Image (tube, rainbow, N blue to C red):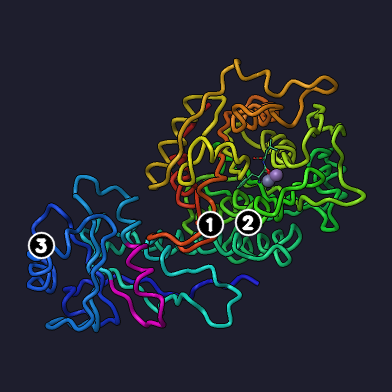
Amino acid sequence: MINLPKTQFNTSSESPASVPADWLIVGVWADQPYSGPAGDVLEKLRERGDFGAKPLELVPVLNPIGIAAKRLLFVGLGTRAQAKRAALHDAAAAAARHVTAKKVGTVAFAVPGPEFTLAVGVGLAQGVQGPGIRKSAPTRFAPESLLLVGGNGADMPRVRAESRALWLSRELVNLPPRELYPETFATVAADAGRATGFDVEVWDESRLAAERMGSLLGVAQGSSRPARLAILRYAGAPGKPVLGLVGKGVTFDSGGLSLKPTDGMVDMKCDMAGAAAVLAGVQAIAELKLPVNVVGVLALVENMLSGTAMKLGDVLTARNGKTIEVLNTDAEGRLILADALCFASEQTKFLVDFATLTGACMVALGTETSGLMTNNDGWGDQILAAVSRAGERAWKLPMDSSYDGLIKSKVADMRNTGGGRWAGAIAGGKFLEQFVADAKWVHLDIAGPSFAEGDSATFDAGGTGCMVRAIVEMARGFEGTALV
Ligand code: BES
Ligand code: MN
Ligand code: ZN
């Protein structure tokens, strides 16, 4: 079911001009003297104002003279001072998209400095995978080989691991919901664990009932596809603290009886992007054998409507005994995360959850920035720093007690919607906060950045692989930290 690019990644220490390849991509700084291949061509382009090396600017040269590669592509990198991971990642992704619309063997990239190997390598991986997974004539062709000319060989294991993880999470998001549902998702997780070397335990619906996960089961009961909880365990630092990662895995969100209109439902196969990020992130961590302990929890359900579906006014009891009045069956993500977070908080005191939780977060922050909510500012800042080191984006939203009223219920301990129009993303955060006990916890609402409705310069439409790179950074930052 899962089909990932077989592309090989390697470095080369040859000079870019002598590397044989179908395409040689050369990154050009806007504010630095150029000393790379085909300097005379570049000089002319600049003189005539045809290329200013602005971020993501692309100029192909289809018959280059004096270099071994068949074709040349200049890509603008912007100014050197702004060269963070995100800028190089995006430049590489845009260039890779340009050269992979046709079948191609080797794509070489002249890395503008060995310190950019990771950014460029994973950026290229981002650009070579497309969403046309069920097209009989593909529209995107991953090359046989990606060659990082002047790249740092020591970074390559990480380039490979993060690239494969990015591809896995995007493929999972792009899979049609008739193929990816809780049971098949759990099987993918188990396969990944076996292949990479981490432990995967899967709970079925009877185990979930025995474990008192009444809130998660409430959501699942309208679907003919039974729920699953997958628990991923990787131990790279026995005896040290454990990083807990929890993912929302609604393999399709119809809204339930609070049915979504078609426009709001069309992309709801993406509602498992949080679980996909957690699975892919743990896979990368295990592949890299990072010295850290991780427990990943994937809450897997389908939110459907039927004669057995939960109803408005129903009251569910979560694993920690708290009762929840269901006033909107479309606020299902927080219901499944409630039980998953309870369980995770019994495993560790350091939690991060990833969830396509609210449209309100997209209204607040747009489609490229995740909302970050936390019950502990120190932990929140640590996670925020990891996200930005990875070249991803998140922005902190307030969680003080002035928002407590958002989840007050007349009949139960809380209700599952904010009730009104305001602070919808924070209402979700305040709800989840009820289930983390005394753990330090961060909630990342990734509804915006996890799925691209259409193509852009750096992305093909579909799953984006959001937070996969960030999870690797979180794990690296967590190494040996004896936070208590
Ligand atoms: N899965 C959706 C949130 C979503 C919307 C993700 C758009 C990606 C893109 C979530 O389950 C949902 O339906 N949330 C409701 C919450 C409301 C009923 C309180 C929403 O945002 O409208
Ligand atoms: Mn929903
Ligand atoms: Zn949802």
Cβ atoms at labels 1 and 2 below 8 Å apart: yes
**Residue at horizontal 71%, vertical 24%?**
407
For marks 1 and 3, the one nearer the N-term is 3
Q: Where does residue 338 sit, x and y in percent of width and height?
A: 72, 36
Which amino acid is tagged 3? Tyr
Packing grade of label 1 (10 A; few <14, some 14-19, many >=20) is: few
Secondary structure state at the residue bearing disc 3: loop
Q: Determine the image quadrant of residue 22.
A: bottom left
Q: Which residues are magenta?
A: 92-108
Relative to 143, 266 lies left or right: right
Q: Amino acid at mark 2?
A: Asp
Please name the residue that numbered disc 1 is placed on: 453
Check disc 3 and report the residue beneath it: 34
Q: Nearer the viewer, mark 1 or mark 3?
A: 1
Q: Is disc 1 placed on a helix, strand or loop?
A: loop
Mark 2 neighbour density, 10 Å: few (under 14) some (14–19) many (20 or more): some
**What x and y, as percent, mark residue 28?**
19, 61
Judging by the rendered image, the residue that carries numbered circle 2 is 267
Say whether disc 3 or disc 2 marks the residue closer to the N-terminus: 3
Rounded to the nearest whole Å, what is the CA distance between mark 1 and mark 2?
A: 8 Å
Compared with 163, 302 (above or below) is: above
Left/right of residue 143 with respect to residue 137 in the rendered view: left
